[in-house]
Image (cartoon, grey):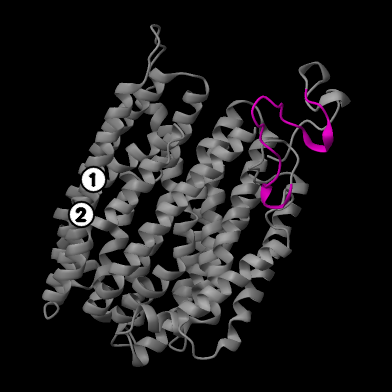
Amino acid sequence: MRGEKNGFFRGAAVLSLGALAAKVLGAFYRVPLLNALGGEGAGMYQLVYPLYCLLLTFSSAGVPAALARLVARAEARGDAPRSRTLFSQALALFAAAGLLGSAVMFFGAPLLCTVQGEPAAVGAYRALAPGVFFVSVLACCRGWFQGRGEFFPTAFSEVLEQLVKFVPWLFFPQALRAETPRAVAAALSAVTLSEAVSALVLFALALAARRRMRLPLHRGMPPRAGAILRGTLPVAVAAGVLPLSNMLDSVLIVRIVGGYAENATALYGLYAGGAAALTGLPASVAYGFAAASVPAVAALRAEGKNGAAEKKVLSALGCTLFLALPAAAFFLLYPRQVCAFLYPAVTGAEGETLAALLRVGALGGALLACAQTLSACLTGLGKPRVAALSFTAAAAAKLLLEAGLLHLPQLSVFGAAYAAGGCYLIALLINLVYSIRERGNRLAALGLAGKFSCAAALACAAALPLGGVHVLVRLAAAGAAYLLLAFLFSVFSAKGIPFDWRKYGHHRRFGFGGRRSVGRRRPRAPFGRARHSAHGRNGARGGGARAGGSV
């Protein structure tokens, strides 16, 4: 159990660090990109992206999670041939779907631009269209690696994507600044290039890993394509509901707000390309715990360890809360400082609007991160349909609320931010009810949320007396205070986030303790009890002693 636990956290840490590095690099490039494109160019950029994400949903979104679940179950049974066949069949199936999605996006660009009311975005759509195919290949490779418990290739590919964008994103938008449509198309061409390079590299790594696998002489029945579709479609629906709602956002905001405001496209760009990109950062960083939860929970469920699987869900949720709540608190208290640092070219009325949007959407980002993690856990538990239904219900409520709020000129684009927060809250509550069933675990989840909320609020408030210092100094002070308060609240103990680094089974705060043997000396067990196989698990007290630590 200890090895499974540390393997889960190690994989989650690798994915989260990879996502964090990718987001930091992406933010580093996105800042000069937004400064070069301005509000109008950012709006055009974000008009194209929702359809791209929607097509990715049908060709690849949900594939890493669903394929990881199927592969993890095969690996848990020692069925290496099935693991290989799952990868081959999923790759053929979804690469074809990705090719179809690319064709739809390329040839349907004029019609889509007419519907959205932005005919100048045709070149942007066509520049991004080939990326749908490459991301489909990339998703299959990531899902196969994650199902086998190998998380470094996914993290590496995410960082590689951002590095490939470096020169195009820094050079072409600045060079074409006077021609906004061409500048946007050049920026989106860099996205396609980055996906292509990352897909080719990860595909080569997957082929090399498949050749190293040892296969038994007897091979069972290969999985059918129908089984793969049944496993991936519910997850794809759950992953695709939000991109679909974001695509409808681009139509609703531009058309409804455009009825009483002349800068509707610019307002949409500030909301989707500025504020929403920042509030979604916690969900991106916590993605590692969501992705690592799928194979970990699926393997425990396949072995019949339902209680251990639910404990793993609680662990993943606790780690997500630990990362998401301080970010939300910081955005809530210091939106002007964050926006002035990241987007110095967005000033005046646009700067004030961007800061206000960031403050309104801060809590929604934390809710989205938690809903995302629990959705992945539901996939691992074999309940992907529940996650699909929860996000569908939440998105429907969001669109209804948004359609009403956007008609109020005093709210304008802020109506979309309020509706998004309500959407994420509904999805989180439904996922929580179906993923954590035991009453004690639900109370533990509420306790973790309370501890992290108090620690995040106090830590960010502690940076208020610093006055006019740089926002990075405030961030460092708040981060240090948060870690100190987390230590004082014992959130890293066995009762908080169950994380066991120790060699033995009993827990100390942060998991440190125990001695290693030196030379030929036998290791001493905790509390001086001798460890011997004849005396049960915990020494002379016999097998009736405590059988293990937390899960």
* Label 1 to label 2: alpha-carbon separation: 8 Å
Residues tagged 1 and 2 counted as in contact (Cβ below 8 A)? yes
Residue type, label 1? Phe
Where residue 38 sits: x, y (%)?
Answer: 25, 80
Q: Secondary structure at mark 1?
A: helix
Would residue 8 appear left or right of 458 to someone viewing this image?
A: left
Would residue 321 appear left or right of 239 to someone viewing this image?
A: right
For residue 514: magenta? Answer: yes
Q: Is residue 55 above or below residue 337?
A: above
For residue 130: magenta? Answer: no
Q: Quadrant of the C terminus?
A: top right
Q: Nearer the viewer, residue 464 or 272?
A: 464
Q: Which residues are magenta?
A: 508-531
Residue type, label 2? Thr
Q: Quadrant of the N terminus?
A: top right
Residue at the extreme front of the image, as rendered: 519
Which residue position holds label 2? 192
Q: Nearer the viewer, residue 268 or 527?
A: 527
Residue at the extreme bottom of the image, as rendered: 348
State which quadrant residue 219 falls in: top left
Q: Residue at x 41, y 35 (%)?
A: 67
Which residue position holds label 1? 134
